[in-house]
Structures are given as C-alpha cells and as structure tokens.
C-alpha cells in the first residue's frame, strides 16, 4: 500500500489529476447505472432523497465537530437557492437516466458547460468574447443533432431529453452561485449547506412515492448515494491536482463508460446521430474550457 502511495505521489500533477478524474467518471457511471437499474421500483424523487441523505451522513462527522463554522454564512439566501436548484436538478437528471439510454443522457449532461457561458455574462458579469459565444451556439447545435426533432429513431426530443437539459441548466446555476460564494466561503461550508438543505428539500418528492426498500435495494440505494458524493470528491481532487484545461478532456471518458454499460447491461446501442451530436458538444465544451483557462492565466499574470 505504501509502495502504491509512493508511486502515486511520484507522478506528475496532471497524471495524478487524470487518475482522480477517471475515478470520478467510474463513480458517476456506477451511480447512473444504479439509478437506471432501480428506476422501475423507485421514483426519481425517492432516489434523490437517498442520494442526498447519503451525502449528509458522510458529512455528519464534520458537521458535529464544527457545527458553528460549517454553517457560518453571510449569504443564506444564495445558499438556499443553490441547494434548491441542485436538488431539483438532481431529480430531473435521475428521471432522464431512468428513461433514456445512458450514453445519450451523459452526453446531454455535458451541456452544463454551455449554459455557463450566458450565465457568466448575465449573473457574474464576466466579459464573454465572440469565440466563446460561437462555441456555445455550436454546442447547442450539437444538442439539436442528438435530439433531432422530427427524425425517427429511439432517441428524439421528449420529456427525458428536456429534463436533462433543464437539469444541466440548474446545475450551471449552482456552479455560478458557487463562483460567487467561494469569494468568502470555504468549500466545506458549501458542501455542508448543499448536503443539509438538499436532504430537506428532497423530502416532499420522496413522500409522494414513498416505499420502504428491501434490504438489498437499501444497500444499492446507499451505494448510489455514496457514489454520487465520491464523484464530486474525486472531481474536486482531480481539478485541484492537475491543470484545469488538461483535466477537462479526461472527464469525457464518462461517455465511453456509459456507452459500454448501456450496451452490455441494458442492450443500448448509440446511434450515429448521438455520436455525432455528442462529438460537437464535447468539442464545444472543451474549447470553452480552454478559453476560460487561458483567460484566467492571463489575469493571474497581470496580477503578478
């Protein structure tokens, strides 16, 4: 174990970050697979409750140890809004994963980066250049290729696709809120508020379709929640360890994992339209990530 830890520590920062990002993609794939597998017996609202409850339980030792510090905030309104948007976004994404091929749902989930472009301009006040605007529009054109309204096929514009697009928009709102809150809040404070309020906000949706799970289902639901929390933790570690522009492409390995699981477990075969549209979305989001990284490096150089 010590030898493995030493070998990991000896890797370059980008190599360590890539391993963390791959672990995040694997955890996300396990979570989305369980969402789909348990979808026949547990509604999106109920699954969301178990997801949020698991995250709260994981953070409970920190909450009990630092009660006053982790709940200290100067923006409770933004904390509440961010948690509400995140909870609703989770519920909508769970509905999409239950009712769409995994590869298609994963591809649409990456539109979060596209939504961040207009939100950064109108909410945070960032200056958005014409190249980023063009990349965002190209990305949404990729979405249209995937959902291809009016064209026959197993995946067309419908409630599941709209739910995932709405979920991505809501998650983009939470990211925008995070950019504002991290100016004077520690990451742990954001996690604790999101986990606590997320569990509270998910209770009404769970009660509408409540059922006591069987022991095996309870174990799988708990694992689903743990994998959701692990996804975020590994992603944060990856972005912290490596260069953001280098880490972003690694996250798209989720598409490969999702396509493989969808094929072998659920007999799902991605269509040419899905692959083509996903390629456009991936290229657009990668370009946006690269432009944001370049802009942040120029700003850092000016400050130094």
Image (cartoon, rainbow, N blue to C red):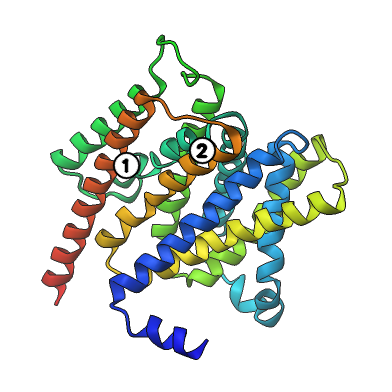
Q: Is residue 303 visible?
A: yes
Note whether 58 is above or below 288 in the view shown.
below
Residue at horizontal 68%, vertical 40%?
37
Q: Quadrant of residue 237?
A: bottom left
Q: Nearer the viewer, residue 252 or 235?
A: 252
Q: Quadrant of residue 152?
A: top left
Note whether 171 is above or below 57 in the view shown.
above
Q: Percent from the top left, x then y, of residue 150?
A: 41, 9
Note whether 247 is above or below 135 in the view shown.
below
Q: Percent from the top left, x then y, of residue 175?
A: 43, 52
Q: Is residue 135 left or right of residue 44?
A: left
Residue for badge 1: 122
Residue for badge 2: 167
Q: Percent from the top left, x then y, of residue 47?
A: 71, 44
Note whether 22 is above or below 174 in the view shown.
below
Categorize mark 1 by other alpha carbons within 10 Å: few (<14), some (14-19), many (20+): few
Q: CA distance from mark 2 to mark 1?
A: 19 Å
Q: Are marks 2 and 1 in contact (CB under 8 Å)?
A: no
Residue at horizontal 20%, vertical 48%?
127
Q: Nearer the viewer, residue 268 or 137?
A: 268
Q: Earlier in the sequence, mark 2 or mark 1?
A: 1
Q: Is residue 193 left or right of residue 16?
A: right
Q: How many marks?
A: 2
Of badges 2 and 1, the one in the foreground is 2
Quadrant location of the C terminus in the rendered image: bottom left
Residue at horizontal 54%, vertical 57%?
27
């Amino acid at each position: 174990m010590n030898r493995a830890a030493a070998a990991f520590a000896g890797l370059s920062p980008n190599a360590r970050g890539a391993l963390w990002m791959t672990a995040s993609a694997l955890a996300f794939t396990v979570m989305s697979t369980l969402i789909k597998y348990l979808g026949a017996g547990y509604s999106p609202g109920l699954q969301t409750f178990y997801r949020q409850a698991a995250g709260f339980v994981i953070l409970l030792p920190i909450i009990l140890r630092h009660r006053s510090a982790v709940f200290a905030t100067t923006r409770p309104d933004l904390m509440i809004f961010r948690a509400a948007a995140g909870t609703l976004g989770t519920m909508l994404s769970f509905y999409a994963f239950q009712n769409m091929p995994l590869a298609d749902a994963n591809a649409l989930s990456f539109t979060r980066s596209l939504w961040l472009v207009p939100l950064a301009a109108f909410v945070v006040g960032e200056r958005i250049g014409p190249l980023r605007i063009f990349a965002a529009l190209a990305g949404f054109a990729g979405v249209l290729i995937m959902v291809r309204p009016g064209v026959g096929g197993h995946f067309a514009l419908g409630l599941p696709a709209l739910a995932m697009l709405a979920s991505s928009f809501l998650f983009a709102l939470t990211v925008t809120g995070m950019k504002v809150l991290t100016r004077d809040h520690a990451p742990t404070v954001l996690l604790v508020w999101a986990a606590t309020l997320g569990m509270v906000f998910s209770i009404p949706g769970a009660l509408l379709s409540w059922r006591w799970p069987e022991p095996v289902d309870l174990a799988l639901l708990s694992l689903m929640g743990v994998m959701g929390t692990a996804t975020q933790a590994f992603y944060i570690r990856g972005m912290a360890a490596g260069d953001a522009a280098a880490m972003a492409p690694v996250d798209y390995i989720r598409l490969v994992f999702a396509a493989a699981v969808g094929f072998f477990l659920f007999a799902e075969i991605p269509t040419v339209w899905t692959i083509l549209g996903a390629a456009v979305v991936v290229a657009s989001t990668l370009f946006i990530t690269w432009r944001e990284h370049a802009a942040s490096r120029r700003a850092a150089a000016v400050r130094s």
